[in-house]
């Protein structure tokens, strides 16, 4: 299995190369050169599998046994999921009015990103130990990625992690989950800006190919292919748990509602579709509606500013994984994608070519959900089921309630729930509901914190480069002092 850049100007690489890369050298994102096609029999066999077994089967299609032998791959995935609170890793809650909520938040930081990042970190450490290498992971976060990435690599001998968080733009709990980890290999910066602004110095650093190579830099944002790979399993699991029967011909469709900011989970769903899974995707966003406008009108353009919402982890203006979706739906036409994305980077606004827009509108429908609708949905779900949604899950469930209220016939529907309500007490309060906060989250309040500020006037790129250079020197010092 080879991986190619969506922009077509970078050499193809294997899974190990894609894992250790952020953006491709030509500015594109890595995608599998070909997608395996799954027939009815394979889908029927997979429908009996547990979630971890499904991840193993999927990963084995995209990671060659010459890189990670199957037994090792199984062990790595078992280890990745060993600390999840739910024995099934994910759990489907079947609620009133045909509401199915797939809980993806039973990992250490109570968010769906634990699932893909735990696996990515295991793959990473496997190769690092094998090659006796060190990497510095650089992550920009809008809330959940940072804490899940820290959790997955904290204490690892061959990995340092630098996280840039948008000070005051994520919830207090999200911030504490990052700043209270005092391990030697964890370095957190609080940026005076939003999550799109803090992505700029990261992109600038990664654009310096020689610097990236010299210091073994990599990213674990959802630009990283390994993250998207594990997320494909969410869609298969949702389908198998919600499809009425796999005995009919053709296989019955299932609608999967995907709340998203950077479109990683949506890209995973589009890949699952292309592999032969009969799902219809509904993408649900908050008031930062660039994806909604793109699906509806082909208008891929930035708004004037990021709007702060109750679903703060989705307060993103640049959904970089849309590039993967465009590439997939254009029939892997890297020339079209390169022109499109380079124009977007120059002008921050691009209209999709007519053919590409119609393919997107065929694969995906979309909704934009206001803060008012989020709190109403949280309230209604509690009233009908005594079930508490986080604001991001409420964005998805709001789409379900709209369909129910229209009383239109539709296929079974599954709403992906990316986080626990326990992480968003402010939103729970706004919905006039009460939260029973887990003890380990309450304990964060009393822990010591460590976070280096990046103020507006500072040179963020210079600060980032200096930190990376220091960590490289420290690693070389430690490596040289190790006994031969």
Image (tube, grey):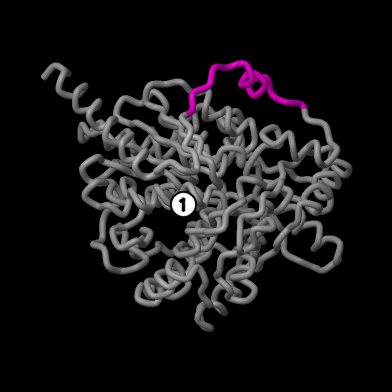
Height in image: 445 above or below 311? above
In this rendered view, identify the residue nearer to me: 118 or 186.
186
For the record, the magenta segment spans 436-451
Tell me residue 52's x, y (percent): 50, 39
Give the vertical position of 137 relative to 361 (above or below).
above
Give the residue drawn at x 64%, y 53%: 259
Q: Position of residue 211 (x, y in %)?
A: 24, 46
Q: Is residue 480 magenta?
A: no
User: In the image, 476: left or right of 385?
Assistant: left
Residue annotated with mark 1:
228
The N terminus: image quadrant: bottom left
Q: Residue furthest front?
A: 457
- Residue 469, given in percent of the width and then of the height, sits at 26, 35
The quarter holding residue 481 reads top left
User: Can the viewer see residue 56?
Assistant: yes
Q: Quarter of the image holding residue 478?
A: top left
Residue toward you, 249 or 196: 196
Residue 95 location (% of width, % of height): 79, 45
**Left or right of 388 on screen, residue 158:** left
Q: Is residue 341 left or right of residue 371?
A: left
State whether residue 115 appears in this view. Answer: no
Packing grade of label 1 (10 A; few <14, some 14-19, many >=20) is many
Q: As drawn, is 57 to the left or to the right of 83? A: left
């Amino acid at each position: 299995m080879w991986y190619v850049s969506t922009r077509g100007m970078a050499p193809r690489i294997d899974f190990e190369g894609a894992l250790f890369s952020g953006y491709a050298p030509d500015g594109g994102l890595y995608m599998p050169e070909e997608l395996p096609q799954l027939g009815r029999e394979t889908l029927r066999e997979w429908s009996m599998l547990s979630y971890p077994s499904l991840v193993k089967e999927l990963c084995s299609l995209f990671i060659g046994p010459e890189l990670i032998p199957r037994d090792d791959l199984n062990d790595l995935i078992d280890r990745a999921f060993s600390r999840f609170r739910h024995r099934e890793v994910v759990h489907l809650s079947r609620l009133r009015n045909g509401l199915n909520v797939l809980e993806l938040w039973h990992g250490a930081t109570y968010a769906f990103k634990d699932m893909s990042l735990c696996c990515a970190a295991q793959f990473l450490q496997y190769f690092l130990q094998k090659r006796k290498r060190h990497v510095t992971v650089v992550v920009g976060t809008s809330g959940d990625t940072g804490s899940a990435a820290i959790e997955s690599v904290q204490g690892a001998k061959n990995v340092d992690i630098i996280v840039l968080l948008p000070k005051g733009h994520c919830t207090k709990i999200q911030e504490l989950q990052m700043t209270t980890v005092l391990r030697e290999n964890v370095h957190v910066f609080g940026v005076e800006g939003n999550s799109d602004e803090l992505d700029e110095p990261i992109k600038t650093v990664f654009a310096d190919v020689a610097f990236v190579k010299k210091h073994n830099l990599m990213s674990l944002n959802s630009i990283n292919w390994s993250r998207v790979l594990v997320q494909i399993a969410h869609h298969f699991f949702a389908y198998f748990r919600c499809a009425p029967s796999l005995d009919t011909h053709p296989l019955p469709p299932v609608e999967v509602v995907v709340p998203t900011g950077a479109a990683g989970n949506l890209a995973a769903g589009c890949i699952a579709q292309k592999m032969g899974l009969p799902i219809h995707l509904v993408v649900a966003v908050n008031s930062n509606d660039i994806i909604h406008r793109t699906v509806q009108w082909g208008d891929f353009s930035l708004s004037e500013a990021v709007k702060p919402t109750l679903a703060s982890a989705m307060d993103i203006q640049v959904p970089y994984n849309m590039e993967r979706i465009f590439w997939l739906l254009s029939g892997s036409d890297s020339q079209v994608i390169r022109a499109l994305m380079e124009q977007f980077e120059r002008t921050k606004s691009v209209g999709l070519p007519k053919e590409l827009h119609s393919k997107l509108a065929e694969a995906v429908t979309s909704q934009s959900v206001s803060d008012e609708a989020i709190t109403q949905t949280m309230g209604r779900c509690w009233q009908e089921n005594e079930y508490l949604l986080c604001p991001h899950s409420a964005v998805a469930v709001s789409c379900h309630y709209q369909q129910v209220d229209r009383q239109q016939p539709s296929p079974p529907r599954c709403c992906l729930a990316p986080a626990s309500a326990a992480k968003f007490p402010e939103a729970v309060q706004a919905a006039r509901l009460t939260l029973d906060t887990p003890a380990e989250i309450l304990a964060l309040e009393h822990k010591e914190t460590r976070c280096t500020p990046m103020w507006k006037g500072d040179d963020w790129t210079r600060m980032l480069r200096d930190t990376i250079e220091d960590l490289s020197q420290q690693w070389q010092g430690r490596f040289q002092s190790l006994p031969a």
